[in-house]
Image: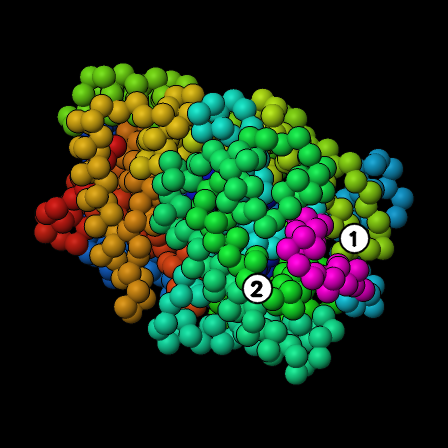
Amino acid sequence: MHTARLRTRSFRRLLKTATLPLGIAALSNCGGTAPAPSVATPPPAPALSANVSAAPSKPVVNVTLASVGLDPLAIDRSQDPCTDFYQYACGNWLKTVQIPADEPAWSRSFNEIQKRNELELKRILEEAAKPGAADPVTQKLGAFYGACMDEAAVDKAGVQPIRALLDRAASVRDAKSLSAVVTELHAVGINPLFDTSPTQDADDATRWIANLDQGGLGLPDRDYYLRDDENSKKLLATYHDHIARMLVLAGIPEKRAAAAATDILALETELAKISKTKVERRDPKGMFNRLNRAGVAKALPAFDWDGYWKGLGFPAIQEISVTAPKFFEGLQTLVTATKPAVWQSYLKWQIVRSTASLLSKPFVDERFRMQQALTGQPELPPRWRRCVHATDASLGDLLAQPYVKDHFPGDSKQSAQTMVSAISTAMGSDLDALDWMDAETRTRAHEKLASLAYLVGYPEKWKAYDFAVDAKSYAQNVGRSRNYELKRELAKIGKPVDRIEWQMTAPTVNAYYDPQRNQMVFPAGILQPPFYGINQSLPVNAGAIGMVVGHELTHGFDDEGSQFDAKGNLKSWWTSIASDKFKAKISCVEKQYSAYEALPGLHVNGALTLGENIADNGGLKLAFEAYRALRKNAKEAVVADGMTEDQQFFLGFAQSWCSVYRPDFERMVVQTNPHSPPRFRVRGPLTNTPQFAEAFSCKQGTPMHPQNTCSVW
Ligand SMILES: [Zn+2]
């Protein structure tokens, strides 16, 4: 669940798609990883002019690439690093890696780490599920996982777990009964029409108010309904078919199901038309509209709002922000003009699609069929993986406790802290050196940097899960969990913001920056090789995890983050001169990335990915400066198979991004995700980094050292 109105800027592609959160969000595990490399002998030293300008007078210590934490066998030495450094650093890995059949993509870092994490979580859960667990935490984990793994019981229950909800959907006769059923569904985490959550007040980030967001779609984004190219039309046809099949599984006769699917698709298309685009949603000011209770009732009077807040258990909520006022105004027309029979079908569909993964095999398989059409993934992940993820989603902080005991060595916290502090120092020097920033704005930027906080490893305070878990009913457990989470979230409204609360679980292989808390968070899950390793050299750790830290820090100053002040309030701290110069700088980045062609005819969306690209560029630059500062007083220069420390830094960075995507998945990512595909996350920042060209002696005019470059931070 997203706790903040403005989604936190996560580091990795977190694809919580509207339709299919399960397998896609979990970029991971199982099956064939990179096969054994064919090279038996150590590769020769690179044909590069060794550049030891960082430490010209230091004695040289020669070691191997593997000993500093780099993968010599991933490198394709037939490639010129100045032509395409990603192909150079990852080329051989790309030639040999196979995407596991139950994955849409595979990466050398995120997926490999997550695969290890999942196996560990599986071990913990299998242990917990054994009879006789003494403590209540273990019992609860074991019961939840056990109920999920009991496929026979799940299959036997069939459609039964959602029967009562489907009957309620069939009771809709008018706007009033529609409101009542939508309320009941929201209470159990099924979200037709719109989404409700708490959000930090844009004008006072210390307090929570309510937030209403557009929603109610089954495809990953509004644009899927409105594009008319061949590929999109094919997907829409598959989606229509998918809805009809799901309705049949829910008990609707086949003949009526096809017509109902047509109605549902038409209704969702109308919802899509009144929804904001992903790029529009990147404007924080536009996303915050303080309508409050009266304003919401005025925008959509046909809906029973008093009944809604009361039904959710929060009748007194008054302060409400709306992300897309036009969406709620548009709903007024839809609510009054759409026939009750269409609402009945739409609600049934929303119930089935939100619960299919909890139901019997036919539902699970049908849900996967649609996922497959979107991602190209051939196989459903094995049940244990799905159950590990379900347990993480419902009882995350319980599962995290045994995990961090064994998998968060104290030194990784120390190391992350050292990295954060070195990178903050680098950002401070960077701010002083910027020629485009005036003194007033610079002072404010320093203030923001000084108050930027961070959390590492795992939360100080674990969340409680005060709901009953039944060892026999998986669907019921998830329903209770969703209801509990909704209440936990909405109960924040009117209360002060708790700055030590985490928005990711500790085993998650990711990181985020939250602009309204001016805070970055690095879960234990990401502080592992190849991002961070105690045996990896400092340049390699800096290129990998250091760049992650720099990336999150730069989010505080990207096109969105820069609109929030040191306290997390949406308040401009820029002079108009500095602001104009900043806009010109970021428009260079937008153009640079828009020119990248991900698939034939499909370019990266420079506007959608702008914040992430600014963060990648800033992150690499800051990590490099931090690494140089940390190695300044080193007594010797370490050369690894002929590679200087600078070269090791850039290789450490690039190799943490070696990734391969199925084409369908890549299409979806480019169309919906704010991150650029990994190869551009490597090429883009490197072409803008003069120290890279220097480290690998790339002549100006080579693809990796172009004439025109972009630089923001
Ligand atoms: Zn990011």
The furthest residue to the right = 132
Q: Position of residue 49 (x, y in %)?
A: 17, 45
> What secondary structure is marked by label 1?
helix
Q: Tag 2 or tag 1, which sits nearer the N-term?
A: 2
- Residue in front for this viewpoint, 155 or 172: 172
Q: Report the coloring of the rendering.
A: rainbow
Q: CA distance from mark 1 to mark 2?
A: 32 Å
Residue at 26% from the left image edge and 52% from the top image edge? 593
Q: Is residue 498 left or right of residue 286?
A: right
Q: Residue at x 38, y 36 (%)?
A: 285
Residue in front for this viewpoint, 697 or 397: 397
- The residue that mark 2 highlights is 338
Residue 8 sits above or below residue 205 on the image: below
Say the numbered circle drawn on residue 154: none
Residue at the disc numbered 1: 476
- Magenta highlight on residue 167: yes
Tell me the chief SS of the magenta region.
helix
Mark 1 CB near ligand 1 (8 Å cut): no
Res 510 visible: no
Q: Secondary structure at mark 2?
A: loop
Residue 451 placement, left or right of 581: right
Q: Which residues are magenta?
A: 160-186
Image side of residue 622 versus residue 382, left or right? left
- Quadrant housing the N terminus: top right
